[in-house]
């Protein structure tokens, strides 16, 4: 039996158990549909979408692929207002606005909505093959309706405790998100410190503790990584950073350049860009705020204050304040199309597993 034929690929109706991470700011329709057409599972992150744009873009997806497809939503708690913290954070970034002659620091406002009744109504109308959630799960009544429509449900865990909660809540598969992963940590029940576990330590523990298909995520960039995950019990992998260097990704030139130089710049977990721990390529803001994460307001309000500064600096060729999301394996990225990347990942994995079998 071929390594890529298993319960997960059968349930998702995909050829290869390779899931492209939703990456809300970078996963374009072109990237996601290309991955689906190549035999993997393409994903589209919808949390930053305006509600009225979701259905039209999903219809574009359907026009570009007949393959299975994943729609992703965030399920974060609404931010708590803390005027003292807001004031301290504004004071800490005031110097940057003055440096770029930006007269006013914006007020804090939410940059994305947690999964709600409106999202649920749209999801049931679209009825995709797969839906995934980050930062936990929506309320039980929502999950019940989703399951009644036979939509496959996936969510992320950063600890064994969270994986057990997800299984008890009725998900169909669990993403074991290692500390190496780029973008936001999916932590929702454990402390962030408890979730600082490398993938190849977390993965076998989640496999042993649950009876569901487990999807490995974090630091996987080639066939060696996929093969290792498979041998540790994963039925699939979720890959994000490796797809960022594909031409179909919505990555601007500054982000692309940062990815190309990731081995020099490195990555770091920070709260400074959004209010929740997330891994990105190190830039000026991440460095400056390294010991000030305690004054960063709650997700998702920080982005509304940082965005005008980040955009203006970027227009001058400066990535100091951009969210340059990337995992620890970014230096292993390859500048090839997403179709070729999927094909290469499958070929590399097959060769590695053959070698160990022999």
Image (cartoon, grey):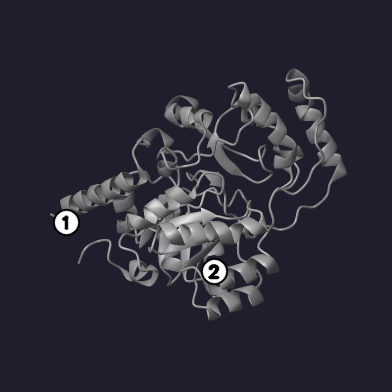
Q: Work out whether residue 129 or residue 237 is closer to the camera in this orientation and state it.
A: 129
Percent coordinates x, y for residue 153 in the rendering:
51, 69
Q: Residues within 10 Å of mark 2 (few under 14, many from 20)?
A: some
Q: Which residue is mark 1?
A: 357
Q: Is 296 placed above or below 69 here?
A: above
Helix, strand, or loop for circle 2?
Answer: helix
Q: Work out whether residue 228 or residue 15 is closer to the camera in this orientation and state it.
A: 15
Taking the image as shown, residue 312 lies to the left or right of residue 124, namely right
Q: Which residue is mark 2?
A: 126
Taking the image as shown, residue 292 lies to the left or right of residue 241, namely right
Taking the image as shown, residue 6 lies to the left or right of residue 86, namely left
Q: Work out whether residue 195 or residue 298 is closer to the camera in this orientation and state it.
A: 298
Q: Is 202 placed above or below 97 here?
A: below
Occupied quadrant, residue 230: bottom left
Q: Is 315 placed above or below 179 here?
A: above
Helix, strand, or loop for circle 1?
Answer: helix
Q: Residue at x 35, y 42 (%)?
A: 337
Percent coordinates x, y for residue 73 in the rendering:
59, 59
Question: Which residue is at the far right?
Answer: 83
Tell me how far mark 1 sits from mark 2, CA to CA: 43 Å
Question: Which residue is at the far left?
Answer: 358
Percent coordinates x, y for residue 116 in the rendering:
69, 65
- Classify the position of the C terminus by image quarter: bottom left
């Amino acid at each position: 039996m071929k390594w890529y034929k298993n319960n997960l690929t059968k349930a998702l109706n995909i050829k290869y158990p390779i899931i492209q991470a939703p990456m809300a700011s970078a996963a374009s329709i072109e990237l996601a549909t290309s991955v689906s057409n190549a035999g993997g599972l393409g994903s589209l992150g919808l949390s930053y979408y305006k509600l009225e744009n979701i259905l039209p873009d999903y219809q574009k997806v359907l026009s570009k692929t007949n393959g299975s497809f994943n729609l992703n939503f965030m399920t974060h708690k609404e931010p708590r207002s803390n005027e003292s913290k807001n004031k301290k954070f504004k004071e800490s970034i005031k110097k940057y606005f003055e440096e770029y002659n930006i007269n006013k620091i914006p007020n804090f406002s939410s940059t994305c909505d947690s999964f709600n009744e409106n999202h649920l109504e749209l999801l049931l109308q679209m009825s995709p093959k797969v839906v995934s959630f980050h930062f936990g799960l929506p309320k039980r009544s929502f999950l019940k309706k989703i399951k009644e429509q036979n939509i496959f449900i996936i969510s992320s865990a950063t600890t064994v405790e969270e994986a057990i909660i997800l299984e008890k809540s009725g998900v169909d598969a669990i993403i074991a998100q290692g500390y190496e992963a780029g973008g936001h940590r999916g932590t929702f029940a454990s402390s962030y410190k408890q979730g600082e576990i490398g993938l190849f330590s977390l993965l076998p523990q989640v496999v042993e503790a649950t009876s569901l298909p487990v999807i490995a995520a974090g630091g996987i960039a080639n066939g060696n990584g996929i093969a290792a995950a498979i041998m540790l019990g994963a039925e699939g992998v979720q890959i994000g950073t490796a797809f960022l260097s594909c031409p179909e990704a919505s990555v601007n030139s500054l982000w692309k350049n940062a990815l190309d130089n990731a081995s020099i710049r490195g990555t770091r977990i920070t709260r400074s860009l959004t209010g929740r721990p997330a891994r990105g390529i190190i830039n000026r803001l991440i460095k400056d705020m390294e010991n000030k994460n305690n004054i960063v307001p709650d997700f998702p309000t920080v982005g509304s204050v940082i965005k005008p500064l980040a955009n203006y600096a970027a227009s001058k060729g400066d990535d100091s304040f951009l969210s340059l999301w990337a995992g620890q394996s970014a230096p292993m990225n390859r500048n090839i199309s997403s179709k070729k990347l999927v094909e290469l990942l499958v070929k590399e994995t097959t060769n590695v597993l053959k070698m160990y079998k022999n």
